[in-house]
Amino acid sequence: RAGETLLVLGAGGGVATTAVLLAAAVGARVYVTSSSEDKIAAARQLGAAGGVRYDRPDWHKAAKELVGGRGFDVVLDSVGTWADALRALRPGGRLIVLGASRAELAALDVRRFYFGQFDLLGTTMGSPRDFAQLLRLLDDHDVPPPVVDRVFPLDRAADAHRYLESGRGFGKIVLDIGM
């Protein structure tokens, strides 16, 4: 939403880069976490206001400092670190979980969750209604196309997967079935 602060975890992924583009287009103040300064700089080119390295043990504190220490209105977690992501939220903030590439189970301090009065939203691909809203958003705002890092022919799917697992990419990794 316009005017809200959003922290997108794992800025190099295809979902995360698209989230930065969409949120910046609607007027959110977007920040990112990443494994490298280069990816944070690339996210800035997409509309992010800044970011922090998630490989520091206190990344959530550094992230909160980007927004004056109060925490973020929304944290978008597509990497599966949502128990740590709660530390970056402001009281009453929203955590949106849409992936779990790092772990399928997360430990949760329930007291931290309810004393923080956080909202938790888990989602997969969305509903037809969500898709219609996304199309309206694209019609109403000047949203650049998704970032495509590399395109692999289908017969090189194993290479594409290795590249994805390497963490070197920034944006979508596409398999082209027509190549």
Image (cartoon, helix red, strand yellow):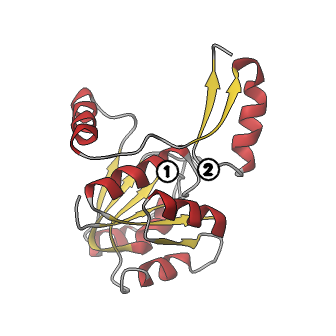
Quarter in which the C terminus is drawn: top right
Q: Residue at x 25, y 35 (%)?
A: 130
Residue kind at label 1, given as amino acid type: Thr
In the picture of the structure, the residue carrying the numbered disc 1 is 17
Residue 76 shows up from this direction: yes
Quick one: 120 or 151, which is closer to the camera? 151
In the picture of the structure, the residue carrying the numbered disc 2 is 170
Q: Relative to 89, does residue 164 appear above or below in the rendering?
A: above
Question: Residue 51 in the image: x percent, y percent?
Answer: 51, 71
Label 1 or label 2, whichever comes before in sequence order: 1
Quick one: 27 or 154, which is closer to the camera? 27
Image-based side of 107 in relation to 39, left or right: left
Question: Residue 42 in the image: x percent, y percent?
Answer: 57, 60
The answer to whether the residue labelled 1 contacts the one labelled 2, judged by CB atoms less than 8 Å apart, is yes
Image-based side of 7 in relation to 147, left or right: left
Residue kind at label 2, given as amino acid type: Phe
Q: Relative to 46, does residue 153 appear above or below in the rendering?
A: above
Helix, strand or loop status at disc 1: helix
Question: Residue 140 in the image: x percent, y percent?
Answer: 21, 43
